[in-house]
């Protein structure tokens, strides 16, 4: 059996467990915010763009062993923007994470330029 199939099955099982503990209805209600016009404040738009750019860096790296260095230019920008967004929502963990990500992106960019 493929490692991808096993990983997908285990990921689905863990997600189902967490959703069951939290409550499927609560999860659905929360995720439903994405479909409400009033949810899309500036900081939530910043968050979804940042999430997408980070996923574009992480997924090829973790799953396929590929580093798309220039995407770190985008993640650098979205990390800066997410620090602003995190202050609007008072999320210190995201401020710390995105501060770390700025250094990560800068390292990849500089390493590529110096290579």
Image: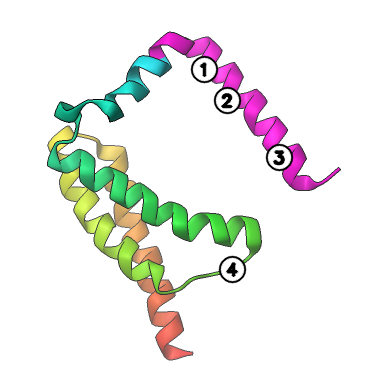
Inspect this view and state whether residue 86 appears: no
On screen, residue 17 versus residue 91, left or right, reads right
In the image, which residues are magenta? Answer: 1-26
Foreground of the two, 10 or 104: 10
| Disc number for residue 15 | 2
What residue is pinned by disc 3? 7
Q: Residue at x 31, y 51 (%)?
A: 50
**56 shown above or below 25:** below
Whether residue 6 is in magenta: the answer is yes
Q: Quadrant of residue 88?
A: top left
User: Is 108 placed left or right of 42 in the picture?
Assistant: right
Question: In terms of secondary structure, where does tag 3 sit?
Answer: helix
Q: Determine the CA span between mark 3 and mark 4.
A: 19 Å
Q: Which residue is mark 4?
A: 66
Choose between 29 and 85: the one closer to the eye. Answer: 29
Classed neighbour count for the residue bearing mark 1: other residues with Cα under 10 Å, few (<14), some (14–19), many (≥20)? some
- Most extreme residue toward the bottom is 115
Compare marks 4 and 1 and give the one earlier in the sequence. 1
Q: Is residue 60 above or below residue 69?
A: above
Disc 4 to disc 1, C-alpha distance: 31 Å
Give the quadrant of residue 108.
bottom left
Which quarter of the figure has residue 91?
top left
Tell me which label, 3 or 1, sits earlier in the chain. Answer: 3
Q: Position of residue 8 (x, y in %)?
A: 68, 37
């Amino acid at each position: 059996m493929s490692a991808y199939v096993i990983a997908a099955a285990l990921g689905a099982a863990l997600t189902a467990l967490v959703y069951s503990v939290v409550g499927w209805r609560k999860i659905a209600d929360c995720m439903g915010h994405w479909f409400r016009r009033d949810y899309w404040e500036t900081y939530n738009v910043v968050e979804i763009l940042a999430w997408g750019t980070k996923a574009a860096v992480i997924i090829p790296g973790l799953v396929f062993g590929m580093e798309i260095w220039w995407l770190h230019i985008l993640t650098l920008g979205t990390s800066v923007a997410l620090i602003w967004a995190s202050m609007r929502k008072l999320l210190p963990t995201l401020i710390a994470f995105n501060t770390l990500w700025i250094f990560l992106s800068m390292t990849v960019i500089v390493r590529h330029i110096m290579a």
